[in-house]
Image (cartoon, helix red, strand yellow):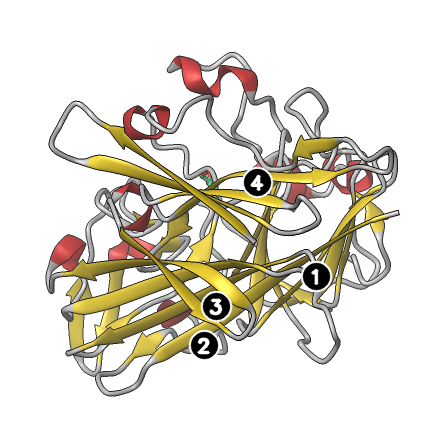
């Protein structure tokens, strides 16, 4: 494993730490401590050409001026929470309402826009990067002084592993994810419409006009949400399904069956690239970059077109505290939160 580091001075006292991990096959991940983010991932296609398979901004400093969530760690709670409210035992907790009346992606000061402490660690599988962040109680309304760590590890088997660990001194809620947009064609030119997706899931959660789950869990059978056998994404993206039209693509949580070696696979035939994914989380939000327009200002988004990437956001179900049957995202003191997501890259 080769490791290289770079420090970039910002125009405040803060510094961005960039680290690059490269395994013996030349599989390369670039990470930034700003947002504990994955800002580049080089993997070869079937011609042996190394290309970047994740969406990123041109320069690490660009992430400071624009909040795109590209490649970032999201939290404390990913997705939306209705009215920013939940009950801790009988007590109403009000989180910041940073998207209309609702709370979204952890609020205005959240995992994706903080400078995380970065250090290198070692386990039996080799070296890994560990980002850590201390969050004081009350930040954006969340209870608990919390310590959160996110590890990124590349293995010699071409796996990228992301491990989350958290602890709190007061009961709180936590549901982190990673917001990497994949584009296995290796560039920003093509959309993900010709990628194929397979998911071991038979239930998805429909959304309302505010992108919040309606609370139902619906069988995918017979709908464009059925990815139990791999499906080309264009079939879903172009369909007249009301849920797809309302979101202009996929932005939906799927319950993972979790009973197989992998929970799903994203593949791109022309390049031969495939990524199998597996998580210890109960669900995944599939987001097909529906808001990108390719002609946005601020200028950094300009090169990202609609459906330019697909985010595979492994997590507990969004808005879980407000829906029966959505599981729990409560974190208690003295109970460590541990989670691992794994992306296995292959080419053929
Ligand atoms: C959300 C989208 C949102 C996007 C922002 C996704 O995780 O589900 O609704 O527009 O993040 O980048």
Q: Nearer the viewer, mark 1 or mark 4?
A: 1
Q: Specify the quadrant of the image occupied by residue 220.
A: bottom right
**Mark 4: is the Cβ under 8 angstroms from ligand 1?**
no
Q: Is residue 56 left or right of residue 187?
A: left
In three-dimensional space, the C-alpha distance between marks 4 and 3, rounded to whole angstroms, equals 19 Å
Q: Is residue 1 above or below residue 45?
A: below
Asked which secondary structure carries label 2, the reply is loop
Report the residue marked by disc 1.
157
Q: Are marks 1 and 4 in contact (CB under 8 Å)?
A: no
Of pointers 1 and 2, the one earlier in the residue sequence: 1
Report the residue marked by disc 2.
324
Neighbour class for label 2 at 10 Å: few (<14), some, many (≥20)?
Answer: few
Report the residue marked by disc 3.
316
Report the residue marked by disc 4.
181
Q: Residue at x 51, y 70 (%)?
A: 340
Image coordinates for residue 181, horizontal then vertical, percent: 57, 40
């Amino acid at each position: 494993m080769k490791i290289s580091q770079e420090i970039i001075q910002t125009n405040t006292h803060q510094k961005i730490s960039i680290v690059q991990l490269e395994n013996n096959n030349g599989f390369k991940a670039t990470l930034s401590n700003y947002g504990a983010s994955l800002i580049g991932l080089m993997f070869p296609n079937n011609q042996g050409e190394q290309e970047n398979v994740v969406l990123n901004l041109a320069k690490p400093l660009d992430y400071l001026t624009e909040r795109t969530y590209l490649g970032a760690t999201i939290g404390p709670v990913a997705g939306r929470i209705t009215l920013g409210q939940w009950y801790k035992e009988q007590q109403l907790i009000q989180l910041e309402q940073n998207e209309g009346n609702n709370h979204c992606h952890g609020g205005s000061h959240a995992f994706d826009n903080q400078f995380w402490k970065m250090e290198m660690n070692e386990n039996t599988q080799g070296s890994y990067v560990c980002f850590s962040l201390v969050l004081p109680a009350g930040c954006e309304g969340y209870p608990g002084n919390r310590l959160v760590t996110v590890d990124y590890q590349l293995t010699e088997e071409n796996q990228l592993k992301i491990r989350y660990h958290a602890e709190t001194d007061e009961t709180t809620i936590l549901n982190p994810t990673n917001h990497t947009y994949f584009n296995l064609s290796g560039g920003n030119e093509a959309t993900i419409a010709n990628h194929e997706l397979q998911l071991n899931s038979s239930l998805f959660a429909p959304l309302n006009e505010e992108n919040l789950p309606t609370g139902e869990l619906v069988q995918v059978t017979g709908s464009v949400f059925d990815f139990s056998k791999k499906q080309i994404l264009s079939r879903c993206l172009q369909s007249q399904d009301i849920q797809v039209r309302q979101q202009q693509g996929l932005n939906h949580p799927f319950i993972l069956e979790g009973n197989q070696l992998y929970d799903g696979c994203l593949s791109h035939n022309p390049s031969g690239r495939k990524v199998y994914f597996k998580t210890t989380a109960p669900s995944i939000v599939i987001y097909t970059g529906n808001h990108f327009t390719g002609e946005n200002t601020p200028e950094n988004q300009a090169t990202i077109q609609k459906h330019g990437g697909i985010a595979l956001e492994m997590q507990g179900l969004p808005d879980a505290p407000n829906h029966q049957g959505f599981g729990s995202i409560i974190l208690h003191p003295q109970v460590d939160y541990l989670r691992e997501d794994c992306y296995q890259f292959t080419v053929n």
